[in-house]
């Protein structure tokens, strides 16, 4: 029975790899850029029509949002790996149980995130030394934003199931619709209704809700065994254990990474609201480029986990090399293009010369070198596709988080500049890349030699 006609939208087990990786990744890149645009559009609207304090309040919240939700995003990666591996093995019963578990986990995690996020938002803002003229606005934005967490989790878990079968187009279509709705509501609430950060937060939640509705609708119309049946949604302990074994380390890596960034943001906060606003504007472009990288990371996870399940190790190796090459080239090209047009890019968010100055410095000292991070992101994704999730987590936590925290502490003991603070990013990308690439080479060589290969 052909994989294409039964349980997959793209045959990852046969045929040319590079063209299929590109076809898989392009909608993912567009999806990531659109998802990031939720926050970016919020920042643009309040930066243009409210104040730089409102811009700092919305833009500076990115690291807090990430630290709260990254654990559950990591678990959705685990869901992707488990479902894709079952597809490679043609295990229909395993797919059914995994999909039922994904549905239940999405709802449970969304409710937990709402409760945790609303309770922890202001204390974290206070610990970050958020300026007095920003903290009230930031707190109001976060309180509304976290009401949308159940919708965001349903979308992310549902999209992980669709992507595990090679379907990256429908998650993209969903984000297009949600992005249009978010933009229209942003302008309506802020310009027409005269609202501040509350308006953009409500618009973002509405976009999340539309995303969740569309993905749920599509999954409920999938043929067996990938169909989501609300009546059968429950936690299957075996499937949840597999998802957590892969997903929790990935989520913890993201959480610890965000914690390290919180300390860096706290250090940036010492330079005032103009520096926060400029850094927040530049960070949006880092995230846009990062989502190009993430697209190839998810391609590595999906292609390697399916082919590993089918015992096709030669295709696993080639998928890793293609994903690494495409990530370095595409992210590097985007880094250069945005940096060269930096003043115009930052100017989209604010016309204030000081905001543009701080934003340009972040582009030149951080964004320009971001492609280096492909080395550990793609290698870590390949390891997770093979079922090894803790190894890249530990290496990334040490290579980026520990070293960055040490740098922040060192700078706190003496007078330092904004650019000195930012310079740690490319240094840690190089160190972490060496560590994770080496780990991938060692682990993959051991795994592929220890198991028989399918012709």
Image (tube, rainbow, N blue to C red):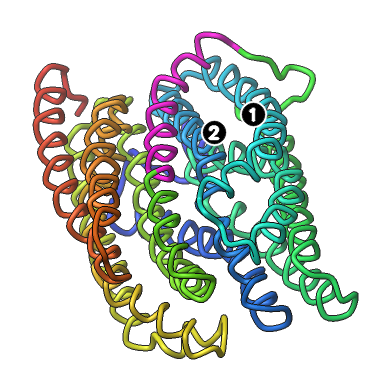
Residue drawn at x 63%, y 61% as measured from the top left: 132
Helix, strand or loop for disc 1? helix
Relative to residue 289, is residue 207 drawn left or right?
A: right
Q: Is residue 206 magenta?
A: no
- Depicted 426 relative to depicted 263: above or below: below
Relative to residue 156, is residue 439 drawn left or right?
A: left
Look at the magenta stretch and give its main secondary structure.
Answer: helix
Residue drawn at x 37%, y 45% as measured from the top left: 260
Position of the C terminus by quadrant: top left
Magenta-highlighted residues: 236-259
Dot 1 surroundings within 10 Å: few (below 14), some, or many (20 or more)?
A: many
Q: Position of residue 438 (x, y in %)?
A: 10, 39
Pick whichever, 188 or 229, lies toward us.
Answer: 188
Q: Which mark is residue 316?
A: none
Determine the image quadrant of residue 295: bottom left
The residue labelled by disc 2 is 72
Q: Position of residue 385 (x, y in %)?
A: 32, 33
Pick whichever, 49 or 405, lies toward us.
Answer: 405
Pick whichever, 403 or 179, lies toward us.
Answer: 403
Q: Position of residue 254 (x, y in %)?
A: 41, 40
Relative to residue 82, is residue 197 drawn left or right?
A: right
**Label 2 close to label 1 by CB (< 8 Å):** yes
């Amino acid at each position: 029975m052909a994989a294409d006609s039964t349980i997959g939208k793209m045959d990852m087990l046969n045929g040319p790899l590079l063209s299929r990786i590109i076809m898989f990744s392009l909608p993912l890149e567009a999806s990531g850029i659109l998802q990031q645009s939720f926050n970016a559009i919020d920042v643009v609207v309040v930066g243009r029509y409210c104040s730089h304090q409102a811009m700092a309040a919305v833009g500076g919240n990115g690291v807090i949002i990430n630290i709260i939700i990254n654990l559950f995003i990591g678990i959705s990666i685990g869901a992707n790996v488990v479902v894709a591996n079952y597809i490679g093995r043609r295990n229909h019963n395993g797919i059914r149980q995994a999909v039922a578990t994904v549905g239940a986990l999405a709802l449970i995690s969304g409710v937990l995130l709402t409760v945790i996020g609303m309770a922890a938002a202001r204390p974290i803002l206070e610990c970050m030394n958020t300026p007095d003229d920003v903290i009230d606005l930031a707190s109001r934005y976060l309180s509304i934003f976290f009401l949308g967490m159940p919708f965001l989790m349903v979308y992310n878990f549902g999209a992980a199931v669709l992507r595990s079968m090679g379907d990256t187009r429908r998650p993209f279509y969903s984000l297009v619709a949600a992005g249009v709705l978010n933009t229209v509501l942003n302008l309506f609430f802020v310009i027409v209704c005269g609202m501040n950060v509350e308006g953009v937060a409500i618009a973002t939640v509405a976009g999340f809700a539309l995303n969740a509705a569309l993905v749920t609708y599509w999954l409920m119309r999938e043929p067996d065994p990938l169909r989501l049946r609300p009546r059968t949604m429950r936690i299957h302990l075996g499937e949840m254990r597999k998802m957590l074994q892969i997903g929790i380390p990935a989520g913890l890596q993201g959480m610890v990474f965000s914690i390290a960034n919180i300390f860096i943001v706290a250090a940036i906060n010492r330079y005032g609201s103009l520096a926060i606003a400029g850094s927040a504007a530049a960070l949006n472009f880092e995230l846009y480029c990062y989502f190009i990288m993430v697209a190839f990371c998810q391609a590595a996870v999906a292609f390697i986990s399916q082919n590993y399940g089918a015992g096709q190790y030669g295709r696993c190796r080639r998928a890793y090399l293609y994903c690494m090459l495409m990530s370095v080239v595409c992210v590097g090209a985007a880094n250069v293009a945005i940096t060269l047009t930096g003043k115009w890019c930052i100017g989209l968010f604010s016309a204030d010369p000081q905001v543009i100055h701080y934003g340009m410095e972040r582009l030149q000292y951080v964004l320009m070198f971001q492609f280096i991070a492909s080395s550990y992101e793609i290698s870590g994704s390949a390891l997770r596709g093979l079922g090894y999730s803790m190894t890249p987590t530990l290496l990334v936590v040490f290579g980026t988080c520990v070293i960055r925290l040490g740098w922040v502490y060192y700078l706190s003991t003496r007078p330092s500049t904004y650019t000195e603070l930012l310079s740690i990013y490319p240094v840690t990308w190089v160190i972490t890349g060496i560590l994770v690439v080496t780990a991938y080479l060692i682990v993959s060589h051991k795994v592929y030699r220890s198991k028989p290969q399918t012709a």
